[in-house]
Image (cartoon, rainbow, N blue to C red):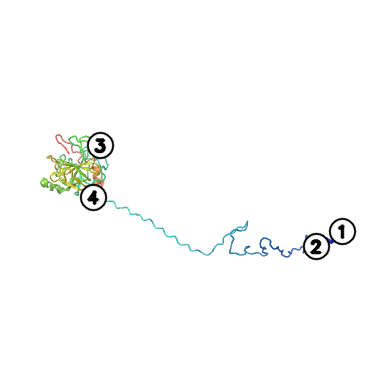
């Protein structure tokens, strides 16, 4: 009995040390006083009332949020003036250059006067930078045998129609003597290009002058070089840079401006177009040849026609217009008649 009273007394003393003893179902829910955090405990005392920011500063967000908490940046609601983009400047496009004017017309290379021979359709420019062999006068490369006044077709060499016709190739034109080149499909051929010069009036003027005074139309050196041959009706120029040999036939040999061994420059006057041919008659024209080195052939005659076309375009500052086949009614003209000899 004495021991039981002692246990009851100890229990009563323990109850007095408690502020509240809550029994289940007693209905009391008031919290007790705020606990006192001992000095030196970690962290600040947590607030007892809700705050907008647990860090005490609504405008500052720490670099690192507490674990498990996501923060969003504060958005500035003030509008920001965004500069308008500069308009794109369109690129400067140079206008297409105006095409050069048409200065002359020409038939395709190898398109010979019908009945005059078999041409070679070769559009190669064998001498790309040569000077045109006539200095200033208008020129009309064409057949001197099958056109007016040439001996086959009849008529007069000073016929105005000869000075209005389009250019026409006559390399490989038929000849009487054996003058050949591997560049032609047949033998006994014309090895150069005949060039009518000037006007119908100039042709008549030449005819009216004594032979030594026929000095209307100048022939020119097509390249820097040296005069390596002077004959009775022809001269030869060897090109200094190309090694080509250029032949000029039917010049006025009495008024020649160069001599054997002379050094000449491109464009220099060599003499005058005439009809010298060692006593054999021919028309007033320049016969022009090019001999050039070709692989497998050596030095041989090559077609001058397209080199002349390009050189004339440069001289005239214009362009040639290639036109359709010759429509002149010469197809019925005969080939070389019996007993008729064509040399150059």
Which residue appears at 87% of the width and 58% of the height?
A: 4
Disc 2 + disc 4, Cβ < 8 Å? no
Alpha carbon separation for disc pair 1 and 4 = 145 Å
Q: Can you give x and y, in whole percent of width and height, for residue 242 in the image?
A: 25, 42
Residue 82 x, y percent position in the rendering: 47, 62
Q: Secondary structure at mark 1?
A: helix
Can you tell which mark lies on residue 298?
3
Q: In the picture, which quadrant includes the C terminus? A: top left
Quarter of the image with the N terminus in it: bottom right
Which of discs 2 and 4 lies nearer the camera? The answer is 2
Q: Secondary structure at mark 4?
A: helix
Left or right? Give the position of 59 relative to 167: right
Residue 106 can be seen in this image: no
| Image depth: mark 1 or mark 4 in front | 1
Vertical relation: 92 (above or below) 250: below
Which label belongs to residue 316? 4
Crowd class of label 3 (few under 14; some 14 to 19; many from 20; radius 10 Å): few
**Of the residues under marks 2 and 4, which one precedes in the sequence?**
2
Would you place residue 231 above or below residue 19 in this image? Answer: above
Tell me whether the residue at label 3 lies in contact with that at label 4, contact meaning CB atoms closer than 8 angstroms. Answer: no
| Residue linked to disc 2 | 15
N-terminal label among 1 and 2: 1
Q: CA distance from mark 3 to mark 2?
A: 137 Å
């Amino acid at each position: 009995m004495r021991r039981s009273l002692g246990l009851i007394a100890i229990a009563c003393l323990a109850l007095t040390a408690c502020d509240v003893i809550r029994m289940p179902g007693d209905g009391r829910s008031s919290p007790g006083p705020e606990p006192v955090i001992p000095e030196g405990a970690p962290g600040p005392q947590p607030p007892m009332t809700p705050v907008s920011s647990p860090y005490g500063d609504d405008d500052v967000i720490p670099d690192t949020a507490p674990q498990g908490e996501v923060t969003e940046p504060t958005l500035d609601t003030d509008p920001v003036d965004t500069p308008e983009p500069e308009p794109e400047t369109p690129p400067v496009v140079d206008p297409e250059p105006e095409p050069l004017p048409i200065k002359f017309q020409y038939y395709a290379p190898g398109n010979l006067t019908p009945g005059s021979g078999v041409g070679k359709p070769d559009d190669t420019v064998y001498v790309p930078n040569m000077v045109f062999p006539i200095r200033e006068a208008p020129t009309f490369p064409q057949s001197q045998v099958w056109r007016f006044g040439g001996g086959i077709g009849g008529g007069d060499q000073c016929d105005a129609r000869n000075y209005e016709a389009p250019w026409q190739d006559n390399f490989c034109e038929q000849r009487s003597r054996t003058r050949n080149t591997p560049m032609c499909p047949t033998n006994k051929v014309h090895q150069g290009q005949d060039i009518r010069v000037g006007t119908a009036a100039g042709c008549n003027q030449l005819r009216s002058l004594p032979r030594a005074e026929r000095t209307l139309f100048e022939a020119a050196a097509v390249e820097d070089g040296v005069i390596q041959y002077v004959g009775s009706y022809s001269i030869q120029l060897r090109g200094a840079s190309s090694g080509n040999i250029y032949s000029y036939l039917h010049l006025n040999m009495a008024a020649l401006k160069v001599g054997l061994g002379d050094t000449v420059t491109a464009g220099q006057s060599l003499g005058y177009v005439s009809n010298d041919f060692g006593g054999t008659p021919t028309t007033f024209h320049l016969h022009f040849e090019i001999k050039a080195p070709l692989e497998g052939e050596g030095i041989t005659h090559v077609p001058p026609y397209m080199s002349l076309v390009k050189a004339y375009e440069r001289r005239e500052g214009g362009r040639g217009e290639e036109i359709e086949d010759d429509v002149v009614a010469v197809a019925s003209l005969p080939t070389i008649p019996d007993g008729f000899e064509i040399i150059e």
